[in-house]
Image (cartoon, grey):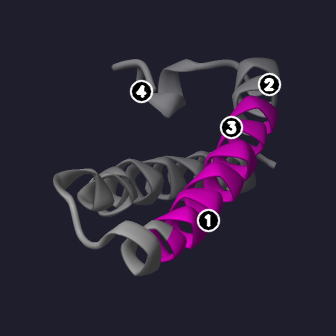
Amino acid sequence: MKDTKFSEMTTEELIKNQKTLKTVNTIFCVVLFMLFILNIFIIFMKGFSAMNIVPIALLPILFLNLKSLKELKKELESRG
């Protein structure tokens, strides 16, 4: 996300960002899950390669997004 602090945003902006972040996280989780499944299949068919590390390398992005969503929810709860 941006470098903006959630405390500086209006409630409407927070709700909009929450919806967007939930959608992005859901899509990212689905794509990451599919990459893991595809990786397992490729490992069995062709063996291990450097490309098999990509889903593992993308996991920190998911965790950062989830942390950001948690902070956003916390800010919304504190306001209302």
Which residue was labeled with disc 3? Answer: 24
Q: Residues within 10 Å of mark 2 (few under 14, many from 20)?
A: few
Q: Which is more N-terminal, label 4 or label 1?
A: 4
Front position among marks 3 and 2: 3
Q: Nearer the viewer, residue 12 or 68?
A: 68
Residue 71 appears at what percent x and percent y?
51, 52
Secondary structure at badge 3 equals helix
Which residue was labeled with disc 4? Answer: 5
Q: Label 1 amino acid? A: Phe
Q: Which is more N-terminal, label 2 or label 1?
A: 2
Residue that appears at 31% across and 51% down: 54
Q: Residues within 10 Å of mark 3 (few under 14, many from 20)?
A: some
Residue that appears at 59% across and 19% down: 9
Residue that appears at 36% across and 51% down: 58
> In the orientation shown, which residue stands out farthest toward the left?
50
Magenta-colored span: 19-41
Separation (CA) of disc 1 from disc 4? 30 Å
Separation (CA) of disc 3 from disc 2? 12 Å
